[in-house]
Image: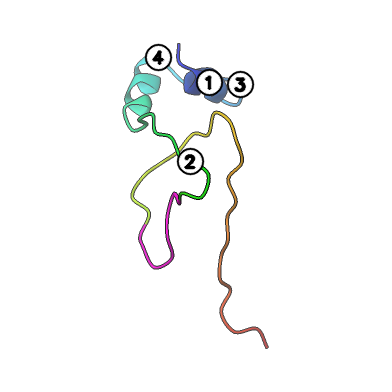
Amino acid sequence: MTELGNYLRTYMNVADADMEALSAYFHPTSLRKGEYYLKQGRVCDKLSFHRSGLLRVFAEQGDRK
């Protein structure tokens, strides 16, 4: 079983066939320091499972009054 499968199974009961289908949406990638997963103004079209490291998330909230 994959690391993703082990992680998900600690939180929910997922059948083997469903886990296989779900895992097909995830592909190994790496980000180096300073690289972006997603830049401002772009639409996110991917899922991620972070095995190690730190990922910072910033979100604009618009005008606060």
Helix, strand or loop: magenta stretch: loop
The answer to whether mark 1 and mark 4 are in CB contact below 8 A is no
Mark 4 lies on residue: 16
Q: CA distance from mark 4 to mark 2?
A: 33 Å
Which of label 4 and label 2 is nearer to you? 2
In this rendering, the answer to whether 57 lies above or below 22 is below
Query: Could you tell me residue 22's position as x and y percent?
Result: 37, 28
Colouring used for the render:
rainbow
Residue drawn where x is 35% and y is 19% of the image: 20
Q: CA distance from mark 1 to mark 3?
A: 8 Å
Residue drawn where x is 61% and y is 41% of the image: 54
Q: CA distance from mark 1 to mark 2?
A: 34 Å
Q: Residue furthest front?
A: 33
In this rendering, the answer to whether 7 lies above or below 62 is above
Label 3 residue SS: loop
* Type of the residue with mark 4: Asp
Q: How many marks on residues?
A: 4
The dot on residue 32 is 2
Residue drawn where x is 58% and y is 30% of the image: 52
**Sequence-earlier tag: 1 or 2:** 1
Within-10-Å neighbours for mark 3: few <14, some 14–19, many 20+: few
Mark 1 lies on residue: 13
Query: Could you tell me residue 8's position as x and y percent?
Result: 53, 25
Q: Is residue 41 magenta?
A: yes
* Type of the residue with mark 1: Asn
**Sequence-earlier tag: 2 or 3:** 3
Seen from the viewer's position, the closer of residues 25 and 11 is 25
